[in-house]
Amino acid sequence: MLSFNSLDLVLGGKELFNDISFTIHQNQKIGLVGANGSGKTSLFKIITNQLEVDPSCFSHSPNLRISYLAQEVQGSEERAIDYVISGDHELLKIKDQITIAEKNEQFELVATLYDQYSILDGYSANSRAQKLMNGLGFKEIDFNKSLNEFSGGWRVRLNLAKTLMQPSDLLLLDEPTNHLDLDAILWLANWIKHFKGALILISHDRDFLDDCVSFIAHLDMNKVDLYKGNFSQFEVLRSMNLAEIKSNYEKQQREIEHMKTFITRFKAKATKAKQAQSRVKSLERMKLIVPAHIKSPFKFSITATDKISNPLIVFKEACLGYTTPVINNLELSISPGDRIGLLGSNGAGKSTLIKTIVDEIPVLKGEKEIGKNTNIGYFSQHQVDDLDLSISAFEHIQKLDITKDEKQIRNYLGSFNFKGEKVLDRVNLFSGGEKARLAFAIIAYKKPNLLIMDEPTNHLDIEMRHALTVAIQNFEGAILLVSHDRYLLNSSVDFFYIVKDSSVKIFDGDLEDYRNYVLDKVSIKKTSDYQASHTSQTNVLNEKIRSIKKEIKQLEKRLERLNLKLKDANEKLADPTLYEGTVNDNLQDLIRNQHELTSELKESETLWLEKVQELEEIL
């Protein structure tokens, strides 16, 4: 379907590819991984003809339909749902042709074009676009908003929906989970599983890669090596390859022994709780993949302060929000050693809780008590954005501790891979990932005993994510973590809270349960929100069944009416006298009525099928 043959590429004086050759077959799903700057995005640009190479080095099947996720979305007055639908280019082309043909009264052409429109599934375009938008976190009130009304992050989501809307044989996704929350990522992974075409996916989210791909193309040292399996399997295979290199063996053993010690210490504390056992398994897996990260330039630690309060922070009957409550009657206590993952859909109140803890917003009602010796280390994109761009990484650390000399500061920053002259570069020259690393360095230097992290993996590559995971695992203080990176969550926390329906309660399960919960396949008992009696659950379920059956009957009656109207319209259009002599003024109205009825009928059939499937899943 698509192949590279002895491809060489030099950009800006830097060699990216040296004699690379590999083939992508129909319906194959491939994860493209490698260090930043290794050429992943350049490979995409070659495939999409944004970067020209020797035609003998790259070829693909004729008429290959490629859908590519662009990163930039400009604001405009265009409606969000229209923007998403515009991803189906062929459909828009037919619609434009219909408009012109109707204007020119080319009625036979109009009928032909409507047939093509139907073949392209045009009548369901609106409902398909709405499903994509719902899955990515948009609400019904967002459909008719203009692009100008959305923030940059939400425009990126719209762009992703537009990309998924486009029928394609090959889907290219470059960091699609940027700006997505965990719920949207779980939905997207499920969508990709059911996608029938081929996929090339660039991502630093290893669990997302595990869900979506069955091959890994690894870019390293100007070469591309293709591994069969998902990312976890790739890491183990790569570890085995690296273990064969004698120069790495001794360092590899030290890393494995370090992980063994940590796992043993954790097992001694572990209860029989499902989440605790899940974390032990994650750590065992980490022990296996350590060699794959031997060459990583990142290795740092976060040391907790000696003095500590117990509890660290307490909320009693607290209402949280800006002007009106988002969370009501909060009862929450965080103690030393607690490792909490915070779950919930976008806008549920996770950030509100975090901002209240760190005093960015006050409690509206109730009590918040912070221990005398509680020292909070807080990471968020806000902290990254607030870095002083006019000074260097060296000066940022020097401001925290004027007693440290240059060598000590350089050694400290070196563990975050700020070395040589990079230490003295102004922060305005840093990439997003470099700014995030500096923010981590500042937090770690302050020795917190309560670490609060809100999406810490944004802009981080896989190697830095691995280093962060190890650092958090070894952190002795308490942790409250919000992240769309399931690997980080699985490896770092002991239990979860879910923010939902204006409350914060323990989620009784692990991330696999949460995935099922998000995809509406989990038992209603999985969260404490729904821990009512068995009788109550049965009543709720029966009521839902009755409601769906009622909707199905209403749709069936509507289908019957629409079919009768369409039959009548078809009979009128079949009358040969309608086409005799001069143009009949009613002909265009009859044709338009026929196609409007066809559209309504198709949408009603789609809704009917969805309701029947929903009922079958419940029963």
Image (cartoon, helix red, strand yellow):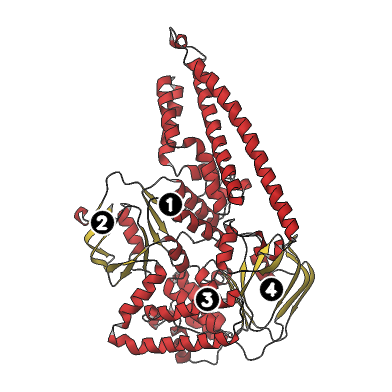
Query: Could you classify mark 3 by the number of other residues whose Cα lies within 10 Å: few (under 14), some (14-19), or many (20 or more)?
Result: many
Give amino acid for label 3.
Ser
Q: Which mark is residue 357?
A: 4
Q: Could you say whether the residue bearing mark 1 is in a helix, strand or loop?
A: loop
Q: Amino acid at mark 4?
A: Ile
Kind of residue at disc 1? Phe
- Looking at the image, the residue that sits furthest to the top is 581
Residue 290: quarter of image: bottom left
Q: Nearer the viewer, mark 1 or mark 2?
A: 1
Which residue is labeled 2 in the image? 3
- Image x and y of residue 160, in percent: 48, 53
Residue at the disc numbered 3 = 491
Q: CA distance from mark 3 to mark 4?
A: 24 Å
Residue 330 location in percent, x, y?
75, 69
Mark with earlier residue (3, 4): 4
Distance between the alpha carbons at the discs numbered 1 and 2: 21 Å
Residue 370 relative to residue 447: left or right? right
* Between discs 1 and 2, the one toward the N terminus: 2
Give the labeled residue for mark 1. Answer: 195
- Mark 4 or 1: in front is 1
Judge the density around disc 1: few (<14), some (14-19), many (≥20) Cα neighbours within 10 Å.
Answer: some
Could you tell me how far apart the alpha carbons at marks 2 and 3 are, in whole angstroms? 37 Å
Q: CA distance from mark 4 to mark 1?
A: 41 Å
The total of numbered circles placed on residues is 4
Q: Nearer the viewer, residue 407 or 568?
A: 568
Q: Is 100 placed above or below 158 here?
A: above
Q: Earlier along the polypeptide chain: callout 4 or callout 2?
A: 2
